[in-house]
Image: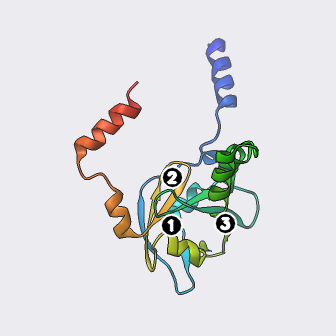
Amino acid sequence: MKVVEKYLRLFRRKRQPLQSMTFFTSEYESKLDAKGRLVLPARIKAQLPATGEDSQELVIRRGFEPCLIVYPMVEFKKVFSKISGLSEFNEEYRKLQRNFLSGVVTVELDGNGRFLIPKNMLTYAQIEKDAMLVGTGSKVEIWNPSVYEKQLIQDPSELSKLAEKYLNE
């Protein structure tokens, strides 16, 4: 019995609490207010890592498709370290850094869970009033709902083939 207790204590010590994990899923319909602010849905807000500060910083970047990507600061720092670690002496690396980082802005959630999306980013993502927020693991995508609908796989067999190709071990 003492051996089991010893391993249980060891296991409990090494486990990270679930609150420290960032894991966004699902789709959420939302609307921008007149000032271009978006309310972060409660389920997404609940998944944001605790910062111990009054304000919650988020990073928004232009997506590779016509959408916006929102990261908690802690998640964006992981991406930033990869991008900034590329050599400035390589032309392709500079081009990637320039184009990737020029489309990045830091925002803060206000007391009502809203954040302001810059107009140039809204234009890029073709978002006017309605928005679709999509949790994709460590980040959230913001789409114009009609553009998002066109990005979805309509054929279940196509999704199955992709899953088999990339998830089959």
Label 3 sits on what residue type? Val
Q: Tell me if residue 113 comes above or below residue 70 in the rendering.
A: below
Q: Residue 89: x, y in percent?
A: 76, 44
Tell me how far mark 2 sits from mark 3, CA to CA. Answer: 20 Å
Tell me how far mark 1 sits from mark 3, CA to CA. Answer: 20 Å
Residue 41's tag is 1
**Residue at x 51% of width, y 75% of height:** 123
Q: Residue 35: x, y in percent?
A: 57, 85
Residue 7's tag is none
Q: Name which quarter of the figure residue 16 lies in.
A: top right
Label 1 sits on what residue type? Pro
Mark nearest the camera among 1 and 3 is 3
* Sequence-earlier tag: 2 or 3: 2
In-front residue for pair 168/122: 122
Residue 24's tag is 2
Query: Mark 3 highlights which residue?
Result: 105
Q: Is residue 48 left or right of residue 136?
A: right
Looking at the rendering, in which quadrant would you find the C terminus?
A: top left
Q: Residues within 10 Å of mark 3 (few under 14, many from 20)?
A: some
**Residue at x 42% of width, y 56% of height:** 26
Provide the secondary structure element on which disc 3 rests: strand
Mark nearest the camera among 2 and 3 is 3
**Residue at x 66% of width, y 13% of height:** 2
* Sequence-earlier tag: 1 or 3: 1
